Amino acid sequence: MTCPDRVRIVEVGPRDGLQNEAAHVPTREKVAFVNRLADAGLSAIEVSAFVSPTWVPQMADAADVFAGITRRSGVRYTALVPNLKGLARARDAGVDEVAIFPAASETFSRRNLNQTIEEAFAAGKAVCGEARAAGLRVRAYLSTSFGCPFEGAVPPARVAELAARLIDMGASEVSLSDTIGVAHPGQVAAVLSQVATRRIPVGRVALHFHDTRGTALVNVYAGLEAGVTTFDASAGGLGGCPYAPGATGNLATEDLVYLLDGLGIATGVRLDAVIDASRAIEPHVGHPLPSRVFRAGEATRLRTPS
Amino acid sequence: MTCPDRVRIVEVGPRDGLQNEAAHVPTREKVAFVNRLADAGLSAIEVSAFVSPTWVPQMADAADVFAGITRRSGVRYTALVPNLKGLARARDAGVDEVAIFPAASETFSRRNLNQTIEEAFAAGKAVCGEARAAGLRVRAYLSTSFGCPFEGAVPPARVAELAARLIDMGASEVSLSDTIGVAHPGQVAAVLSQVATRRIPVGRVALHFHDTRGTALVNVYAGLEAGVTTFDASAGGLGGCPYAPGATGNLATEDLVYLLDGLGIATGVRLDAVIDASRAIEPHVGHPLPSRVFRAGEATRLRTPS
């Protein structure tokens, strides 16, 4: 196996994580969380989303969070935007990057975005055009790339076709997302193989796994073997997807860093500092965070002789 | 990657799982659990342990469990035995196989078994000799093969040396055990590579992972890539190791089957039937079982429109 020497982790806890938590987290705690994650060495952080506060109340304070954080040199601060209105708010907030989020399956697109795939791609293209003209980088998630809660399997060739369209419309990077946590490593290899036939450089592919069925890390491993060097993760394993039946949290940043540290793959991220960030946010989400490494660390900590 | 076409799962839930649960499970429920697991297609089941009831009260009914189960043709029923006294009780109960359990690190051996490594190997050798003379197969666990809670790292060459000694003394199979759930796939490859230099056929190597840090499945994947075809797992993710600080449950059978099904590797095990077995035992252990696939299935079930 030839693994990459270095991997970039895109921290999605403050947005994808908190957005899917029921408890309302105070703005100052979100700000402190982002700052702690940057201090831990995470160089790409999805901070918030400029979406309708009616639909996503947790993200209503996006501008305040951006205004509150301490910008750390070398860190890319990202916000999710669904349309040009969101883009305008994101620009005002001084984001480094915006993220768009179309889906690879029609039913999920309609139920989650209230748009057909083509409508979501058209909206994404408009955002790409304006964002790039303004000098902003664009990241594109492609939801349900490994399975749809309504339609089941999604053909890898279809995923690759849509990923290529996102690159063609100006996305710097496409994050193939296992929204409902059903992927297995054979499927990861199959999707990446199809993506390669579309001549998308592997450096522009990211992988976004949910640990719903415990397969997130083994899917990362299959991605590493295929040369992928960018992986999304959420501190503590925060979040999930409320629209996907049975979906639980994102891959935890701690679990990912533990694996990569073990494999000798550099990330620039300090595991203990991520655990500290999770420990500080945990009381505000109202339940124990699911990260296995976080929990094992807490158990050891609790048992440390006084 | 060249994966094996077929894998054998050794189900350890009734012993390694229940032994490490605080709640006392009634004998009739243990019997039903074993029968359900056999019905699900598991062809090797560790049923109980003939150990001191003073030390392990949960296993005090080992003989009654063996007397109660319905022996299914083609299924191997195993019991853990620490010494010749345990072996005698196991033989009386009509086991197909006994399992011995020395460790690869001195401090763990002393604290867990109250024996030095050499004393545990001497006891194991005596069990092997008598068991094989009586026509019984012997399985050997090698605890702390990937790390010790007291000593930290365990050298792969040392693990390989001890594994070779277990094969030489008559064990049919050595199960390299990550007792505290710290292994990562690079380490799995390193240990298996050392084992190969000892000329132990890979068909006589099993891998036993704990999911303490979420790495059990990715470690299985590394094992598959190295040609290993036998993996231990515990229905529902039951159990752990009470002597190892911070250790949580075994790799869940459901999670392993989900991965292998996805990879197209045959196991003969029906996932839905394992979930049924876990669902039936869950109320008797007094807490939600940690298997991710089990929980995802339960969540879907709960949300099924009535």
Image: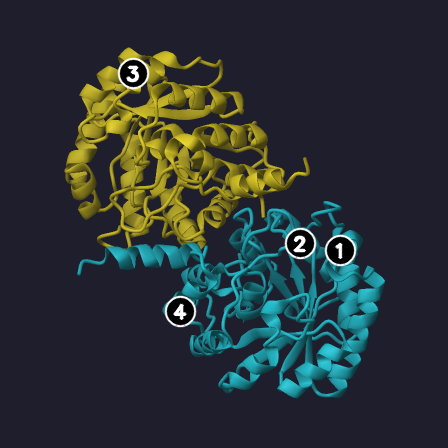
Chain colours: A yellow, B cyan
- Amino acid bearing label 1: Arg
Q: Nearer the viewer, mark 3 or mark 2?
A: 2
Write down the quadrant of residue B160 in the picture. bottom right
Which chain letter goes with mark 1?
B
Tag 4 and tag 3 share a subunit = no
Return the mark for residue B111. Answer: 1
Mark 2 vs mark 1, CA separation in Å? 8 Å
Q: Decide if residue A100 is on the left or right side of residue B18.
A: left
Q: Residue B193 at x, y = what percent?
A: 70, 56
Q: Residue at x 60, y 81 (%)?
A: B63
Q: Decide if residue B138 is on the left or right side of residue A203.
A: right
Disc 2 element: loop
Disc 3 element: helix
**Residue at the disc numbered 3:** A63
**Residue at the disc numbered 4:** B280
- Amino acid bearing label 3: Ala
- Specify which label sits upstream in the sequence, 1 or 4: 1
**Residue at the disc numbered 2:** B243
Mark 2 vs mark 4, CA separation in Å? 27 Å
- Specify which label sits upstream in the sequence, 2 or 1: 1
Write down the quadrant of residue A98 in the picture. top left
